[in-house]
Every structure is written in structure tokens, then in C-alpha cells.
Image: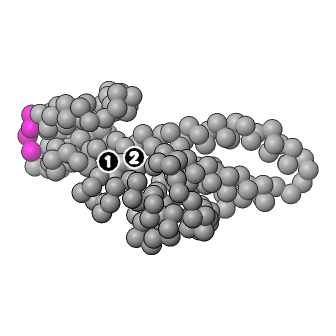
Amino acid sequence: MESTENNQPYGEAELLQRLAEADEGAFALVFKEYYAVLCAFAQKIIQESGDPEDLVNEVFLKLWNRRQLFSDARHLKDFLYKSTRNACFDAIRRMIHSKERQAVFLGAQAEWEAAADLEMIRLEVFSELYHEINQLPEQCGKIVRMGYIEGMKNDEIAHALGLSVQTVKNQKSRGLMLLKGRLPAEIFMVLLLLSAHS
């Protein structure tokens, strides 16, 4: 969990301990951290086969009732993603009634699982990227987000913010330099790939 002490009242170990003890505040923090990204993850898998929000709500109900002490944030995250993925597959199975369509589903399940895992990785990468961009100085973060995430050109950003093109370039360079020191190398490479297309 990438949350910092600035926006979380207690550390990772205490959060997980409180969660295991059915602390509503800890549960609310986990819900806020993961709900939206799990809904996006579920939507990619189920398409028209169900309501992603209903499925994710069921996953969080399962978490609440489980009263499990997770070893670390990765353990909790793995539980949430795998439970969401399994709930999606169950929803898809319920949509398939004939034996012929069931056979097609079983043949395609391995492919769907691989695609779901890739989507989970993509969402985690962008979640960390957004988190670090949001930690940049306000104007710098806004320009980096507009340029690299939204794909706007330097002159478009300059016009939108009432700045010179050179200021935009300077802020983008500053943002890249700061992010290089904060992001894991593989995630920083994703940002560089985005910049190559911006």
C-alpha cells in the first residue's frame, strides 16, 4: 500500500492488525484505497456479464467477515485482486448455460486469466505513477499529468495554464528528474514511454 503517514493515521502493520480486529476505520481506509481500481479491474474481465461494483462489494464483504491478519500489504492486495478475479469468473460462469458454451469458456479461461493478470499489473503501475505525480509540487505535478498522462502538447498546456512554453518544458524536466528518484526503474520507464508519445 503506497499510502504515506501524511494521509494515513497509522502504519502498515497497525492497519493490518486493526483490519483483522474488524476496526471500521482501518476497513474504510482499505476500501478507499482499493475500491475504484478493483472495480476497473473487474470491468475489464466481466464486460457485460455482471455489475463490477456488486462483485467488488462482495469481495469487501468477504474481507470484512474473514478477520484475517495479513502478513503485509502485498498479501492483502493479492487477496483482494484474486478474490475479485474469482468473483468475475463465477459471474461469467453463471452467464453460460449450454454445455457447448461451457466448453468454450473452459478453453478460454487460461487466456482470460493471463489477460486479467496483465490488467492487474497495468493498473498497479498507473496507480503508483499517479500517486507519485500527486506528490510533486502542485504546478509541476499538474503539468506532468497533462503532458504525460493526458497526452497534451507543450503549447496546449501553456495555453491552458497561461504559461510560456519554456516554463512548461522546464516544469516537465523538473518533474521527470524528481520522479526518477522516487519511482522504481521499471515504472519510470513506463513514464518515459508515455513521454515519447506525448
Q: Name the residue: 40% across, 43% down.
A: 126
23 or 30: which is nearer to us? 23
Q: Name the residue: 34% across, 55% down.
A: 11
Q: Position of residue 163 (x, y in %)?
A: 9, 45
Q: Assess whether residue 10 is covered by the magenta stretch.
A: no
Magenta-colored segment: predominant secondary structure: helix
Q: Position of residue 43 (x, y in %)?
A: 58, 54
Q: Position of residue 28 (x, y in %)?
A: 43, 68
Q: Name the residue: 45% across, 49% down.
A: 73
| Horizontal relation, residue 177 to residue 40: left or right | left
Rendered image: mark on residue 127: 2
Q: Is residue 172 visible?
A: no
- Kindly report the distance in space between the C-alpha atoms of the residues bearing marks 2 and 1: 6 Å
| Amino acid on which the number 2 mark rests in the picture | Ser
- Few, some or many residues within 10 Å of mark 2 (<14, 14–19, 20+): some
Q: Are marks 2 and 1 in contact (CB under 8 Å)?
A: yes
| Horizontal relation, residue 157 to residue 2: left or right | left
Magenta-drawn segment: 163-167
Placement of 127 over or under 48, stated as above or below = above
- Few, some or many residues within 10 Å of mark 1 (<14, 14–19, 20+): few
Q: Quadrant of residue 116?
A: top right
Quarter of the image containing the C terminus? Answer: top left
Could you say whether the residue bearing mark 1 is in a helix, strand or loop?
helix
Rendered image: mark on residue 131: 1
| Horizontal relation, residue 186 to residue 91: left or right | left
| Horizontal relation, residue 138 to residue 50: left or right | left
Return the residue found at the far bottom: 24
Q: Assess whether residue 164 is covered by the magenta stretch.
A: yes
Could you say whether the residue bearing mark 2 is in a helix, strand or loop?
helix
Return the residue found at the far right: 99
